[in-house]
Image (cartoon, grey):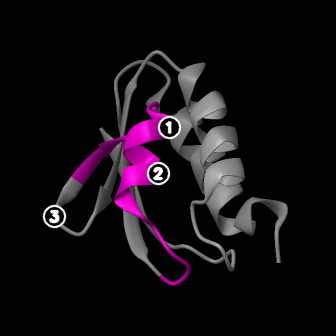
């Protein structure tokens, strides 16, 4: 299991476009990937769960990957989140 803490940087947070990009990227990994947000554990491969969590700009989240290719999954997740999903 590997994990990393992040602050969501993009102005709109995990709105539809970045949430869909994130889910599509995480779906290709065979490991379990979870976003911890407050007291919620969110399946990072579920667009509905991510949207329902209402993760906004400035939110503190932890991404946890467990299983095969966990390091690669966390690395790609970090790249997307830290870049603000290519948004300002």
Q: Write down the quadrant of residue 85 in the picture.
A: bottom right
Residue 44, given in percent of the width and then of the height, sits at 43, 39
Q: Residue at x 69, y 74 (%)?
A: 10
Residues rendered magenta in the picture: 41-58
Left/right of residue 43 with respect to residue 21 in the rendered view? left
Q: Which mark is residue 51?
A: 2
- Mark 2 touches mark 3? (CB < 8 Å): no
Whether residue 48 is in magenta: the answer is yes
Q: Residue at x 36, y 45 (%)?
A: 2
- Mark 2 touches mark 1? (CB < 8 Å): yes
Residue assigned mark 3? 39
Residue assigned mark 1? 47
Q: Residue at x 75, y 66 (%)?
A: 83
Sequence order check: which comes first, mark 2 or mark 3?
Answer: 3
Of residue 88 and residue 5, the one placed in the foreground of this image is: 88
**Quadrant location, the N terminus:** top left
- Secondary element under disc 2, as helix, strand or loop, is helix
Whether residue 10 is in magenta: the answer is no
């Amino acid at each position: 299991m590997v994990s990393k803490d992040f602050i969501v940087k993009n102005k709109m947070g995990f709105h539809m476009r970045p949430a869909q990009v994130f889910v599509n990227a995480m779906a290709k990994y065979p490991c379990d990937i979870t976003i911890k947000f407050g007291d919620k554990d969110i399946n990072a491969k579920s667009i509905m769960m991510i949207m329902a969590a209402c993760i906004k700009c400035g939110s503190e989240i932890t991404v946890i990957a467990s299983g095969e290719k966990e390091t690669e999954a966390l690395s790609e997740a970090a790249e997307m989140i830290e870049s603000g999903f290519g948004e300002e």
